[in-house]
Every structure is written in C-alpha cells, then in structure tokens.
Amino acid sequence: MKSIVYSDTGDSSVLSLAERSIAEPGPGEVRVRVTVSGVNPTDWKARAGAGIAFDEVVPNQDGAGIIDAVGEGVSGLGVGDRVWIFLAAHERPTGTAQEYTVLPADRAVPLPEGIGFDVAASLGVPAMTAHRALTVHEFGPVRLAPGSLDGRSVLVQGGAGAVGHAAIQLAVWAGATVIATVSSDAKAELARAAGAHHIVRYPDPAEADRIREIAPDGVDHIVEVSPAQNAALDVEVIANHGSIAYYANNNGEEFTAPIVASFAKNVRWQGVLVYTEGEAAHQAAVKDITEALRDGALPVGEEAGLPLTWFSLEETAAAHDAVESGVTGKVLIRVADEAA
C-alpha cells in the first residue's frame, strides 16, 4: 500500500511516499481503508517537533474510511462499516496518511447514514476540541444535545477556524446564542454561514462594548484560540461563573489576565487538549458529535462556513504546508475513491 512516512523531524521535506505492507489488526483493533485524511496544526507540529518515539511515523490523526478487517474481541463494528477516525496516530506510528491504517476500535466511529467522508474527516480534533470547550462550565452541561445550552451565550474567538467553526455549529445545535469574532469581512461571512448569530470584527477598541451590547450580563462560555491576545477582553465580557476554554497559543506563548476581575467573577480558566483530556471526555464527544451528525448540524464546505482545500496523498507535504501557513478552512487529503 501507499504510505506517507517520516523517520526524522523537520520541515515538510522529511515526508516521503513509500510502499508498505498492509498490517493485520490485533485484539481490540480495526483496519480501515482510508478514503480521506484530515490535517490539523498538531500534525505538522508533531512532524516538526523535537523528536519521534518510533523508527518511522505515518502522520495525521483524523480521517474517514471503511472498515475492512476486525481484530479479536471487537464488538459493535464490522467489515464494511463507514467510520470517522480520531487520534489514529496518538502514541502510535500509524496515522491516516496511508491507504490502510490499523487503530484501536474505539477510535473508529460509525457514520450516520448520508454523512459524506468530507464531513467525517473534518471532525476529529477540531470537533472534539470544540465539544470539550463547551462542556467545562462550572454548572454544565457536561454533554451537548438540543436544548442543553438554551439561555446560554457563547463567544467563539476566531470563528472562521476549524475549531471555531465546529464550536459555532455545536453551540447553535445545543441552543446557545453564539457571538463570533473575526478579522475580515470574508471570515465574517464564513462564521455567519456556520450559524453564528452575531459577528464582531477585530481589531476594534470598542470590541468589548459591542459584545456587551449583545450579552449585557456577560457571555457564559468563551472558546478561545488566542489567550495571549484576548485574556483581558475575555475577563471583561465574561459572566459571573463563566468558563474560558483555551486550546491554542495563537499570537503568543504566554498570557496574563486581570486577577481581581477574574476571581471576582469566579471565572474558570480551562485548558483544552484532546490528546490528554481522557477517555470519558473522548466518549462523551464521540456520542454527542454523532448525534449532531444525525441531525445534520455539522456540514462543511464554504457554503457551511468551512472551505475545503484538497490534496492528493502524494501531495501530503503541500497539505502540511498549507495548514502551517494558516489557510482558512479545512485541509483534506483524498487518499482513495470511496467506491474503490
């Protein structure tokens, strides 16, 4: 089979196309014929990092495809099932940038009928991060469903990114009023297409005033991509007992926040990293995301607020470069035709 591999960390030139044998699934594992591989910032960052724990790594955590073999002890999944994949390469060397990948059965999730592989491969890290960010409030909910965020307001900082897009969609599905911040008119259109009820442009010295006009009592949940830039603003607009869930380090590696204003509002600062959040959070996200898929709440494509940029498997290095350069939307790799 065709695989994209690397044996040393570095820029995208360390990636190469290779022929590898197709592995058999072990106990508790499934093998998936990959149709689409999704690329996230953590994929290129892992490739460019300080080192790797394996002799050879196939990159990319997320993807979608069809199960073609099932290991001993696996229940609830079978050959022919269409699935979305998350954390395929977490603590393993076998990601989705290859024609077949073997992974633990609980990281392959059955797709509801009618959901395309483009949607499926866009889930994983972004959607699970968004789910976690929306479920860390002191007073819940810990699960998302229609009505679970009724009466709540959600501020999504960076509403045109992949996580921001998923956060808007999940929050709207759960009943929240959603405010999204964006840096351009084009991104405003994307956030609006994703379902955001209100758009606030930045930079704007009156940004906090504009948010408080929409949510006079403060916002209940903040999904934060850039705490180094936005911490003070977040504290200014957060409601009493609100949660600020931050998942990235855009615009800086460190942040400071107003201390008195934070504790006076009983603010909960919550870091979010899918890789270390634990199995309970993973399974809650898997169940709720699947229900949102059934309800048609997570479409992708420019008309749904998440432009897709496609590459072939042979162009995986270019796909990584596109994500690293900050391309708007989701980068996907077409590994195989669904009917192949």
Image: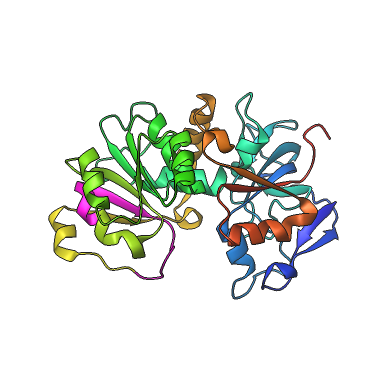
| Residue in the picture at 74% in, 43% down | 34
Q: Give the side of residue 136 with respect to residue 283, left or right.
A: left
Position of residue 156 measured from the top left corner of the image (x, y, whole percent): 37, 46
Position of residue 292 measured from the top left corner of the image (x, y, whole percent): 49, 30
Q: Give the side of residue 24 with respect to residue 186, left or right.
A: right
Q: Is residue 338 above or below residue 11?
A: above
Q: Residue most toward the bottom? A: 50
Q: Quadrant of the C terminus?
A: top right
* Nearer-the-camera pick, 188 or 119: 188
Position of residue 170 measured from the top left corner of the image (x, y, whole percent): 43, 36
| Residue in the picture at 42% in, 52% down | 183
| Residue in the picture at 34% in, 57% down | 203
* Nearer-the-camera pick, 204 or 295: 204
- Quarter of the rendering containing residue 185: top left
Q: How many marks?
A: 0
Q: Is residue 95 above or below residue 121?
A: below
Q: Is residue 121 magenta?
A: no
Q: Is residue 252 magenta?
A: yes
Position of residue 234 measured from the top left corner of the image (x, y, whole percent): 27, 54
| Residue in the picture at 37% in, 31% down | 174
Q: Residue most toward the front? A: 185
Q: Is residue 297 above or below residue 48?
A: above
* Residue 135 showing in the rendered view: no
* Nearer-the-camera pick, 17 or 291: 17
* Nearer-the-camera pick, 78 or 90: 90
- Quarter of the rendering containing residue 81: top right
Which region is colored magenta?
Answer: 235-254
* Residue 265 showing in the rendered view: yes
